Image: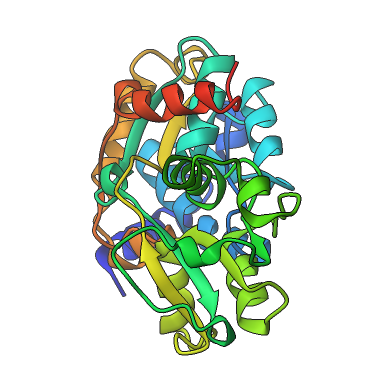
């Protein structure tokens, strides 16, 4: 058992006479995450993170699942959650809606994230270093409508390379699978011929044996861009005391347990983040109409 998990268990097993339940002594920290993959798996992966933060910060912490990307932004905007694991786009949308909110942490890989463009083997499209113009006219799907790696950036690269909107390039209305794992499965099944998704999700599905890379091929890797982040609501310091957001940031950046880092698909670790890290995403989102 890892030292971090051992610490969590020891704190949770302390008798009630030695440590009163958090519910009697203060507010509960509610957080959420964009449902970019299987929602049931996501909930299971976030529970250890909730336990870790509760132990380190000495407050009750609870993960709140949401139905879709837009719901995660709405929950943050309404103050129903005060911490969220956002993508680049949802992060800038949430921070624009809540003045004073701030990005506080990101994965070591997130300043240079990327998308995969994938194709079913039956298309005959081979992997290359240039934008795959062979995708033109194929049955294509994005992920969620508000996904950075599954919508915003793929659409940006399609427009930049072809000079056309996706519906013009593919000759059909935009299709959305709803999540990265569903995109991969739709392409693998041949339901659609091509798609775009987060590279981390695709690599995870291949490692788990759920995707056959010979059948569901990566044919292009996009240039790098900034993506996922933990974003904190300004009400955190109001509810939990001055300096709490900084303590929360330190807890996230200080997370070293391999199992916990794996649970958020960031085995490389977390680093500090700031709103300025996502200015290029915000600019692009405004240009494409995703941010007002």
Give the answer, above or below, for where 72 lies relative to 144: above
Residue 271 or 235: which is nearer the viewer? 271
| Residue 172 horizontal side relative to residue 31, left or right | right
Question: Going 30% across and 21% down the picture, which residue do you hit?
Answer: 276
Q: Which quarter of the image is occupied by the N terminus?
A: bottom left
**Image spot of residue 85 (x, y percent):** 49, 42
Is residue 268 shown to the viewer in this render? yes
Give the answer, above or below, for where 84 lies relative to 270: above
Question: Going 49% across and 77% down the picture, which residue do you hit?
Answer: 205
Q: Quadrant of residue 171?
A: bottom right
Question: Going 53% across and 74% down the picture, which residue do you hit?
Answer: 119
**Image spot of residue 88 (x, y percent):** 45, 37
Question: Going 45% across and 85% down the picture, which residue do you hit?
Answer: 213
Scheme of image coloration: rainbow
Q: Quadrant of residue 226?
A: top left
Give the answer, above or below, for where 111 lies relative to 231: below
Residue 159 or 26: which is nearer the viewer? 159
Count every numbered label the image shows and give the total. Answer: 0
**Image spot of residue 143 (x, y percent):** 62, 55
Residue 159 or 35: which is nearer the viewer? 159
| Residue 111 horizontal side relative to residue 20, left or right | left
Q: Which quarter of the image is occupied by the C terminus?
A: top right
**Image spot of residue 158 (x, y percent):** 49, 48
Residue 245 or 196: which is nearer the viewer? 196
Is residue 248 shown to the viewer in this render? no
């Amino acid at each position: 058992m890892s030292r971090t998990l051992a610490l969590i268990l020891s704190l949770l097993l302390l008798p009630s006479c030695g440590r009163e339940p958090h519910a009697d002594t203060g507010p509960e920290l509610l957080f959420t995450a964009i449902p970019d993959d299987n929602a049931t798996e996501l909930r299971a992966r976030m529970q250890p993170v909730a336990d870790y933060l509760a132990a380190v910060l000495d407050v009750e912490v609870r993960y709140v699942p949401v139905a879709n990307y837009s719901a995660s932004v709405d929950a943050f905007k309404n103050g129903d959650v005060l911490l969220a694991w956002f993508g680049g786009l949802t992060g800038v949308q949430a921070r624009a809606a809540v003045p004073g909110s701030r990005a506080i942490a990101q994965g070591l890989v997130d300043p240079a994230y990327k998308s995969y463009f994938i194709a079913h083997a039956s298309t005959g499209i081979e992997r290359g270093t240039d934008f795959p113009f062979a995708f033109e006219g194929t049955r294509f799907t994005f992920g969620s409508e508000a996904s950075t790696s599954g919508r915003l950036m793929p659409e940006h690269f399609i427009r930049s390379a072809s000079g056309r909107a996706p519906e013009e390039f593919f000759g059909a209305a935009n299709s959305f699978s709803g999540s990265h794992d569903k995109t991969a499965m739709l392409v693998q099944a041949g339901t659609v011929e091509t798609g775009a998704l987060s590279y981390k999700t695709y690599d995870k599905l291949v490692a788990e044996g759920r995707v056959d890379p010979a059948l569901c091929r990566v044919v292009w890797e996009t240039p790098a861009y900034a993506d996922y982040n933990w974003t904190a609501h300004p009400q955190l310091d109001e509810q939990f005391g001055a300096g709490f957001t900084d303590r929360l940031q330190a807890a996230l950046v200080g997370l070293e347990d391999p199992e916990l880092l794996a649970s958020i698909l960031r085995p490389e670790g977390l680093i500090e983040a700031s709103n300025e890290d996502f200015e290029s995403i915000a600019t692009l989102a405004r240009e494409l109409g995703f941010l007002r």
